[in-house]
Amino acid sequence: MGAEIQAMVPSFDQLLWPTIKALKATGGSASNEELLAKIIELEGISESVQALIHTDNRQTKVAYNLAWAKTYLIHKTPLAQSWHRLRIRPSWGCPLPRARGLEPRDAPVSQDG
């Protein structure tokens, strides 16, 4: 059963789009904890998956993968991190424009977001 639950943990690249959605849902700025909680809520990540601890024994696997997703997004999109908050860079305004190449294939194309 442990391997089945581990296989359900979203990888960093599977968290890219949920991170953008969660950031938009929090108004364009969120602490690490707020962002993780919103992703869990929006994606319906089960408690058993949330409870898996990463091998560093300091954080969950979901939180670890989210940290890598945020790192990728900060370097590849109009996001910035200041101290412990992820935010949309002011020069880009809000709502966050679609990140280059990060839209899910089935996402509706819209001019407003």
Image (spheres, grey):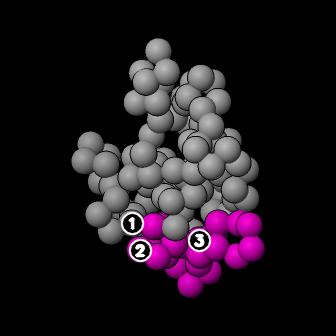
Assign a secondary structure to mark 2.
Answer: helix
Magenta residue check for 55? no
The answer to whether mark 1 and mark 2 are in CB contact below 8 A is yes
Residue sticking out furthest to the left: 105
| CA distance separating discs 3 and 2 | 13 Å
| Image point (59%, 43%), residue name | 54
| Image point (62%, 80%), residue name | 90
Q: Disc 1 or 3, which lies upstream in sequence?
A: 3
The picture places residue 65, in percent across and down from the top left corner, at 52, 50
- Which residue has dot 1 on it? 99
Position above or below: 102 against 100: above
Which residues are drawn in magenta?
Answer: 72-93
- Which residue has dot 3 on it? 88
Classed neighbour count for the residue bearing mark 3: other residues with Cα under 10 Å, few (<14), some (14–19), many (≥20): many
Magenta residue check for 90? yes
| CA distance separating discs 1 and 2 | 8 Å
Quarter-of-image position of residue 53: top right
User: Is residue 24 visible from the viewing direction of this image?
Assistant: no
Amino acid at pointer 1: Ala
Assign a secondary structure to mark 1.
Answer: loop
Residue sticking out furthest to the top: 1
Q: Which of the two discs, 1 and 2, sits closer to the camera? A: 2
Amino acid at pointer 3: Ile
